[in-house]
Amino acid sequence: MKKSLLIGGLSLFGLIVICGISLTMVFFSYSNREITLRNRATAQEKENKTVFDKMSKTILQQAQINEKYASDFKEVILKNTENRYKDKDPAMLWITEQNPSLPQETYLKIMNSIEALRAEFQQRQTKLISIQQEHTNLLTLFPGSLFLTGRKPLEIKIVTSSKTEAAFSTGVEDDINIYQK
Amino acid sequence: MLIYLNMAIPVIAILLMILFFGKKFQLWEYAIIFAIPLIGIIIAKSVSINNQTRDEEILNYYFVSAKYTEFYQTYVHQTCTRCVRYDSTGCVQEETYDCSYCDDHPPHWEATDNLGKIHSISENKYNELVLLWNNESKIELNRNINYHFGCGVDGDAFITKIKNDSLKYIVPFIKKHVYENRVQCSDNVFNFQEIDSSDKRLYGLYEYPPENTFNYNPILGVNNLEASKRLSKWNGKLGLHKRCHLLICVFKNKSNIAATKQESYWKGGNKNEVVLCIGVDNDNKISWTYVFSWTDNQLLKIELRDEILAMNNFDLIKIVDHFGNKVSKSKGWIKKSFKEFSYINVEPTHTTIIITFIITLILTVVLCVYGINNRFEDER
């Protein structure tokens, strides 16, 4: 009788110890996961900043180069035309020539750059949102919610435009004419 | 983590056993009631997660050389022993006899890929390579053949090598590779909308092409064998260095929504894929293009989309060559590492949790009944 009581007691004690250790491990596992996600979000936010910086500088500088190219091109054409018709018989001016046009490739390149860099930045922002989603799930879903009570939700910075913010705060978007100034 | 709540069953069972059948249990029996369901739950969890995250990508290679080893036969001189008399203790007398035999070595054909791995191939495949590369040479193996009456045939080897890596000489083949894709089964923002069968029918969406080692068709929606072979050759050529897999989906008289639906249906494609979707009208003109891929290089996708659209006429061979050239020359093509998505949490499915619950319950009951009725109580 005593032996069976001892075995029962020992088993109960073992069970409590195992459950205790398991719960502690689960707590640390949840806690570490929550901290990892928070750190990942911070790192992603920093990465987004650099990508945004790269995006705006690349677009700006490409646009500047394009503008300079266009003005240089215009100057060359003007000078050429001036020199060609200088001291010419006005009677011969009826002859028209086909002037070289500004190559479209430069504009296409900048258009593609804008689209690609914007898409890249959007992907990075999506990743940040995805990390936040995982963090929110961790904090709010059972059994994570049990172990992580009191932890603050992850706040992230998403770059949008004032137009988007206004549309989402009012729930109205009137500006639908694409040619409206 | 929810699946571990099933452990409540053995824990409660142990408590009940301690309370009502304490005399009939030893310590190790309680341990078994706890450990076996735990192992079952761990296995069920890993199987469920593995099934959900398991994905397959197609890797592309090509052959660089092939070898044919001829049939040869040699007589092997050998002496064996056998038992001729037995008694109750076993063999009591042995004798030796001549067990020489004619050893046949069948012919075999093998090819080496651009990774240096050797594959066994068929005779027809070998002949195809010989015909294409046209430089077969003999290797004298100088075998030591023992001739004996009708037995004994000498055999040598023949080898053929690829001339260069131009598309003309490339014989591509594919291999499946399994990887972990956590995005496809999660509710994460990176995942795509679910496509139902009505959408599939409406937009004429495609399944992945069947995996055929030597006759893989990477072009869907058009039956153009020449273009398919050419794109497979491009895939073989780019497979090792660029680690990419090119696919083309052609949609006849469909809106460009079909392409985004296809992207959703394939969950963005596999991590090494670049999928070019082309909309074609009745006059065989390209009406729209769309490129999807997990690569971070957005410029490649945009340029490819615009350049193919600018072709105007739907000339598939021209498109295939442009596609292959573009990716091969693009310095920015980067295969996405799906380890980036390791932070996405994947839980076992509800079905797995319910099945595990039932199995745990049955296991626990069986183990408890066994614990109560086994002989170990008598030993105490």
Image (tube, coloured by chain):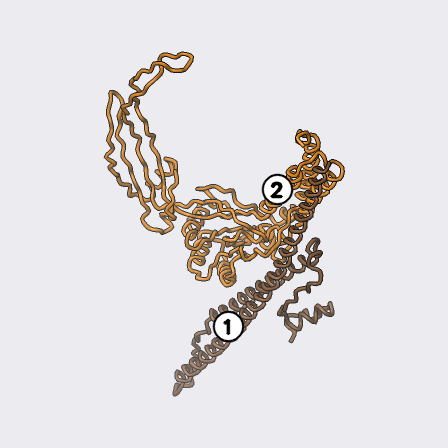
Q: Is A45 left or right of B4, judged from the image as shown?
A: left
Q: Chain of mark 2?
A: B
Q: What hue does chain A carry in this figure?
A: brown
| Mark 1 crowdedness (10 Å alpha carbons): few <14, some 14-19, many ≥20 | some
- Name which residue lies at 25% across and 36% down: B141
Residue B337 in view, yes or no: yes
Q: Position of residue B21 (x, y in %)?
A: 74, 35
Q: Which mark is residue B367?
A: none
User: In screen coordinates, is B293 left or right of B122?
Assistant: right
Amino acid beneath label 1: Thr
CA–CA distance between discs 1 and 2? 56 Å
Q: Residue at x 28, y 43 (%)?
A: B135
Question: As rendered, which of B288 and B5 lies closer to the eye?
Answer: B5
Q: Which residue is mark 1?
A: A58
Give left or right: position of B5 versus B341. right
Residue sitting at the far bottom: A87
**Chain of the residue where label 1 is placed in the rendered structure:** A
Residue B326, image x and y in percent? 44, 58
- Residue position for label 2: B39
Colour chosen for chain B: orange
Q: Position of residue A8 (x, y in %)?
A: 71, 40
In terms of secondary structure, where does tag 1 sit?
Answer: helix
| Residue at figure coordinates x 44%, y 76% from the top left | A99
